[in-house]
Image: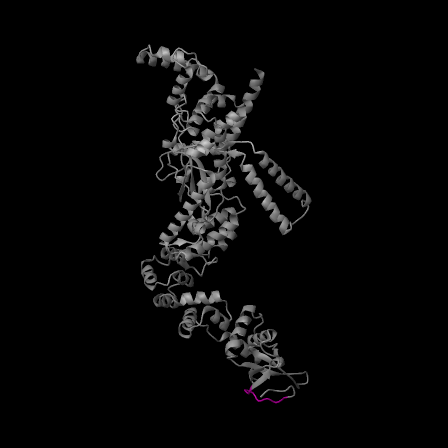
Amino acid sequence: MIMSAKSIGIPDGTEVRIPLSKLKKSPKNARKTPHSEAAIEALAASIAVKGVLQNLVVEPEVDGEGAATGFFCVIIGEGRRLAQLLRVQRKEIKKSEPIRCIVDTANDPHEISLDENVTRENMHPADQFEAFRKQAEERGFGAEEIAARFGVTAHVVRQRLRLGAVSPKLVQLYRDGELTLEQLMAFAITDDHARQEALYERLPFDPDASTIRRLLTEAHVAATDRRARFVGLEAYTEAGGTVLRDLFTEDRGGYLEDVALLDLLVTARLGREADNLRAAEGWRWTEAHLDFPHAHGMRRVYPHSVELSAEDQAALQAVQSEFDRLTEQHQAAEELPDDVDARFGELETEIERLEAKRQAYDPDDVARGGAFVVLNHDGTVRVERGFIRPEDEKPEAETGLEGDAEARNEEDRGGEDAAPDDEDDEGASDEEDENQKLSDALVRDLTAHRTLGLRLNLSEQPDVAIVAITHALAAQIFYVGAAAHVVGIQPVRCDLAAHADGIEDTPAGKAWSDRHANWARQMPKDVAGLWEFVAELDHDSRMALFAHCVALTVNAVKLPFDRRPRALAAARRLAEAVALDMTSYWRPTVRSYLGRVTKASIRVAVREGVSEEAAERLSAMKKADMAQAAEQLLAATGWLPSLLRTAASQGQAGLQSEAQDREPHSQAE
């Protein structure tokens, strides 16, 4: 029966139905910490489907004189009362909804409230996983319906269903305490029980979850892989590919199972990008490659500065004026309106497009050259233009090959008795005529003496020596096969991309590429004009070119079983001399360092870069989580591993001091 507010004298243990509006929280309830919103949500969902499964325990409220007030205080079941109030807010029930209760006036209210919360044992998680799976398999409930019936999210249901689908043998090991929940979650990456059990049999003692996950997916491609990012999961699945979802990582990533299909899609899309580039820019050929083919053996040409057309110049001035006007109008604004911000983006894109037209390739180079279309390590497309195949070189190639230059000189003379009309070749005709009358032995003898004279004079003229060595380096670096240098110094270059995956995509790699391309654009097209180019540079520009060429030959890469201890020691001295600060070029990230070292090394990095306390807080984390957390902690610290640190430099100070010592002496002279 429904109790009225005037009811009194209810016998102990009586089951009654009391209106929800007459139930109040008991001040004698042992639980002082409020129920979480999620817990109340879950109870409300459960009650909506199945009703209140367990009676509330209440006692009549009395006033100061011991008279019943008509209200009842909830000793056990406060969470259920709050859940029903939530349902009232949602208009699912009314405030007068009768609630089944047991009246208890015999027991101490505080004690039985405490007993309710303490004297019980939660269901083992494995039992939960299997119970959820039973709901799905036997009753046909989907994840959304199960979630609604138990007041949890559909994602939580999917996680529990996945765990319930793990091999029963491994689930039992989890029950027995021989596997942790994290390890069981890692096994759940696949539903192949045979693979799960086979891997367990060959695992080392107490492997971490990341090892299990890696071994189970070693034949797959992670969704974060550059190929997957380039193609896109949607395009991959539309083509029939399957994705193995990892429901237990924060980004809910996955693994692409059909690697052959993925590679086919990557190749096809890169090929389309290459075809579009050839059609749009007119290159003779374009090739698509997953990685840039460094050993291509081709000469490279670069764009040169050109004047904008009158139309493009007017368009550039118009968009630049609008950009400046908007900048002035909104310079004091803390935040730009969305439409203004979007317009700024459009203007910047148009300015970049028009500015790019100031650099153009020679049409002849485009007609016989080509470009490589490659996949960057961030999943974007990179285009490398301006490569000339050996078979496409002209008979009189712009590389300035020595034999071709001599042939052109002979044609310019108009016959063996004609005087040269090119000052660059002054004396060449007389020398060749005379050489034809001399024996090879005598020519060698005389030119050896001439070489000795050159050495003596050059050793006394360091400024000319800088021109000669810069010419020699530039001739070999920027002109493939030119053989145009007289100074016997050869640049030996080390391809850093072969040693550090993705180094070309870093800001430092792009800065070097831009610097090299900038010099290449300035080089004369024919190597025959290189000496004059170098000689006519002002001192600072010549030294900058010299430094660039020398820098290209630096090799401080340490290889396994390296036998260059003195060279590596010199690299350390060079780092000190140039005051190398690697914080400008490198950051400790999961990809660059933290994901490739042990947990102990990660803690050392955090200890050195942040604090001992911060390192200790990471100790209990899994390897992947620890690496991610360490990346965030170290982001603004400037921490470097010992291999990248530069010792306090005395070399640079010594060089500066030496320069200062020379300067007064030079002025005195």
* Quadrant (top left, top right, bottom left, bottom right) of the N terminus: bottom right
333 up-or-down from 73: above or below? above
Q: Residue 650 at what x, y percent from top left?
A: 51, 31
The C terminus sits in image quarter? top right
Span highlighted in magenta in the image: 7-15
Can you give x and y, in whole percent of width and height, for residue 101 in the image? 56, 83
State which quadrant residue 30 falls in.
bottom right
Q: What's the image's color scheme? A: one colour
Q: Please state the horizontal and vertical placement of residue 425, each as a whole percent of the image.
A: 43, 16
Q: Main secondary structure of the magenta part?
A: loop
Disc tally is: 0
Q: Residue at x 45, y 66 (%)?
A: 158
Q: Residue at x 34, y 38 (%)?
A: 561
Residue 642 shows up from this direction: no
Please say whether residue 413 is visible from this viewpoint.
yes
Query: Residue 152: where, in percent of width, then height?
Result: 50, 69
In the image, taking residue 62 as reference, residue 164 lies left or right, namely left
From the viewer's side, name the closer residue of 336 and 268.
Answer: 268
Q: Quadrant of residue 475?
A: top left
Q: Nearer the viewer, residue 647 or 644?
A: 644
Q: Is residue 177 magenta?
A: no
In this picture, is 657 found above or below 417? below
Compare residues 87 and 590 and report the one nearer the observer: 87
The correct choice, above or below, for 89 with respect to 411 in the image is below
**Above/below status of 167 relative to 216:** below
Residue 573 versus residue 537: which sits nearer the camera?
A: 537
